[in-house]
Image (tube, rainbow, N blue to C red):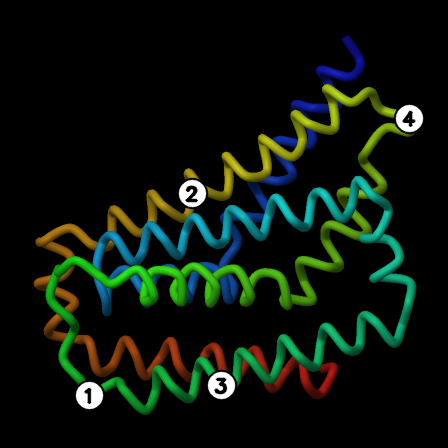
Amino acid sequence: MQLFQNLMVLTGVLALSMISPGPNFAIVTSTALNVSRRAGVIGGLGLAAASGTWTLLTLAGLGLVIVHAVWLYTAIRIVGALYLIFLGAKILWQAKKPAAPEVARAEHSERAIFRKAYFVSLTNPKSAAFYGSVLAVMLPPQAPLWFSAAVVAIAVLLSGLWYCSVALLLSTDAVRRRFARIKTWFDAVIGVILMGLGAKLLTGA
């Protein structure tokens, strides 16, 4: 019974961490609005895969290593910061371009979208801090295999449901029509936010 209670608490904590605004939300939002519903969902699946990866790393004990190994955490922070600045600058540069129509995407493009979302989440220092500290501390010691498997499944499922739902909601015809009128400003804001987050991480502020 105690393990089930721990699982419920972990589920709540994971859910709260995922719905908080950040680079993940910005990426899936921008992709769903600028490219297509399918692309947004693929980005959401990439973020879900990253959540599963972080959970597996935490269960393996690597989350705590990342947090406590200063050089490794610093490396992740710098790489993540530079990548966010690059993405933000790219979105800002392309802000005036019209949104792409809802068309079938090539496999390479879909893989690129998946990789971009996955890498954004995997190089996010906030993810390293959360999974390496909060989640690692909340995991019961010597938990059975079924419990660990359940935590991974819940992390992937929650992340996938949340980000894919965001992508589906924002890619409806009504939302996209409204978005078309403010696309330049929206992309500019998203670009500046990503660059700002990257600069903040880079300076350690």
Give the SS element for disc 4. loop
Task: Give yes or no for contact between labels 4 and 1 (Cβ–Cβ under 8 Å).
Answer: no
* Callout in the foreground (3, 2): 3
Q: Which numbered tag is attached to residue 162?
A: 2
Name the residue beneath numbered marker 1: 96
Bin the neighbour count of mark 4 within 10 Å (Cα to Cα): few under 14, some 14-19, many 20 and up.
few
Q: What residue type is labelled 4?
A: Gln
Q: Where is residue 55 in the image (x, y as percent from the top left)?
A: 69, 43
Sequence order check, earlier mark of 3 and 2: 3
Q: Quadrant of the N terminus?
A: top right
Name which residue lies at 32% across and 91% down.
93
Name the residue beneath numbered marker 3: 86
Task: Give yes or no for contact between labels 1 and 3 (Cβ–Cβ under 8 Å).
Answer: no
Q: In this view, does 53 lie to the left or right of 116?
A: right
Bin the neighbour count of mark 2 within 10 Å (Cα to Cα): few under 14, some 14-19, many 20 and up.
some
Q: What residue type is labelled 2?
A: Trp
Bin the neighbour count of mark 1 within 10 Å (Cα to Cα): few under 14, some 14-19, many 20 and up.
few
Q: Which residue appears farthest toward the bottom when viewing the image?
A: 93
